[in-house]
Image: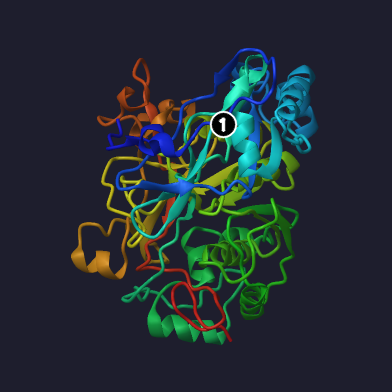
Amino acid sequence: MVHRKLTMLAAAVGCAAAMALWAAPGSMAATRLGVAPHLPTGASVVGLLPGATRVNVAVALRPRDPAGLQSFANEVSTPGSSLYGQYLTPAQFAARFGATPSQITEVESSLRSHGLSPGPLSPNGLSIPVSTTAGQLEQAFSTSLVRVALSGSRAAIANTVAPLLDANIAGAVQSVVGLDTLAHPRPLLQHSAVGAVRPRARAHVVTGGAQPCAGVQAAQAGQGGFTTDQIASAYGLSGLYLTGDQGAGQTIILYELEPYDPDDIAAFQACYGTHAQIANIPVDGGAGDGPGAGEAALDIEQAIGFAPGANIVVYEGPNSTATGPGSGYYDTWSAIIGQDRGKVVSASWGQCEALEPAGDAQALGVLFAEAAAQGQTVVSASGDEGSEGCNNPPGQGPPDFSLAVADPASQPFVTGVGGTRLESPGPRPLEQVWNNGGSPLAALTAPGASGGGISSRWRMPSYQSGAPGWLGVVQSYSTSAYCGGGSGYCREVPDVSANSDPATPYLIYWNGSGSVGGFPRG
């Protein structure tokens, strides 16, 4: 089990965070939903959040038939099942598994009675957005919101006690998502420093797909790294391209919590001769402007490069911040799955599973079960801190070497994607696990390791427990001790892997004159 030194937040704030009164006169008995968040080691409360601060939360509702949803999502995804491939539309999902109309009415009525204005119900019937001020939220849920200084450079917001709900709706609510920002989704991206591998193969590989321009080939020859056609060749996409399959008619959905510069994407397409259509869908106001940290640009350019005929839809939501709570990371997933615009969904953002509020993780788990029920494949990076998924990047907090995995890659209805080191793309690829933690030089020039390990929250799904023995999924390290004990085992991560080592980087256009992997745009 993950062990970490934690301090109860409610105890830490003491008298400085006075509790607000439950607002509704003569209301029914009320109950707390879940528990208050805990402060990580080294964190401290620095004051109250100003009452006028704007906040956005999502009241996530429980599905009407949780066991039935899990069963259906498994059956519809399992070849040989009588339900295999009989996917639902979002409207059908809402009618079958969303909260009941009476539950929705009661929750909305309760929120209004405590001074909140619920927004429109999500398409799946499972979440209600609320946009208000910190002061109104504190009064409505009988809690206080405080500012927290974390070790390193990041600040956060947290609630001092769990939200208080009217007893008649407590059973219908899964979580109030976004009350704290202690668990912070981050891009699972490592920028290459120096020493990128120069592949043992020519840069230009005739795949039948997108081909790089002379400028990119020259940059690759000079500094190392891989071009898109090399990666496509290494992973066997050439055969698809040669039959004319470049992804036409398919839509790839990208989950992003940062902006990107359209000029970077235009430069990539001009170099590779692609003309992919890109649609941007902002959630909760979007992710802002600018080039971002490179994650969104990398995701978009690689999706275009590998499937130049596909449509690309980028959902951009705001990440949780130090200025106020927010449910942007959850709302972005809810929009992607609830709108069901494409059947392939990719995310390279994750957070420490052990620090994520249990209710939030369960609410996300319902969304991913919905995705499976609708025939959407969700893939997510497993992290870049090896088996220590809660460890902090340099400058962002103290080291945390406890064993942990990243969410959402650890979710049972998500395919977790780990990392490898691709020494050569072929003709016979040379590849090994990405783990630079044991080499001081590698850790300096190309830090990190493929995320992976055993989940402390989820049981092992049948597609792992029933895997052929020669795959070694169930082995001496498999156990149920980390996720509650009993029969069976815990979910293991990752499920599949591909090149991710910053010493064998992807060459992309980013930030005008720079690139992840290091060549200028132009």
Return the residue nearer the eye: 395 or 403.
395
Where the N terminus falls, by quadrant? top left
Measuring 73% from the left and 19% from the top, which residue is drawn there? Answer: 103
- Residue 64: quarter of image: top right
Position of 282 relative to 3 (above/below): below
Where 205 falls versus 186 (above or below)?
below
Residue 8 position within the rendered picture, expressed as x and y whole percent measured from the top left: 36, 33
Looking at the picture, how far across and down is residue 23, in whole percent? 66, 26
User: Mark 1: which amino acid?
Assistant: Ala
In front of the other: 514 or 391: 391
Residue shown at 47%/54% (left/top)? 186
Quadrant of the drawing holding the C terminus: bottom right
Colour theme: rainbow
Query: Which residue matches tag 1?
Result: 20
Q: Nearer the viewer, residue 173 or 422?
A: 173
Q: Is residue 429 visible?
A: yes
- Residues 187 and 142: in front is 142
The residue at the point 51 percent across, 52 percent down is 349
Image side of residue 384 versus residue 55, left or right: left
Q: Crowdedness of circle 1 by 10 Å Cα count: few (<14), some, many (20+)?
A: some
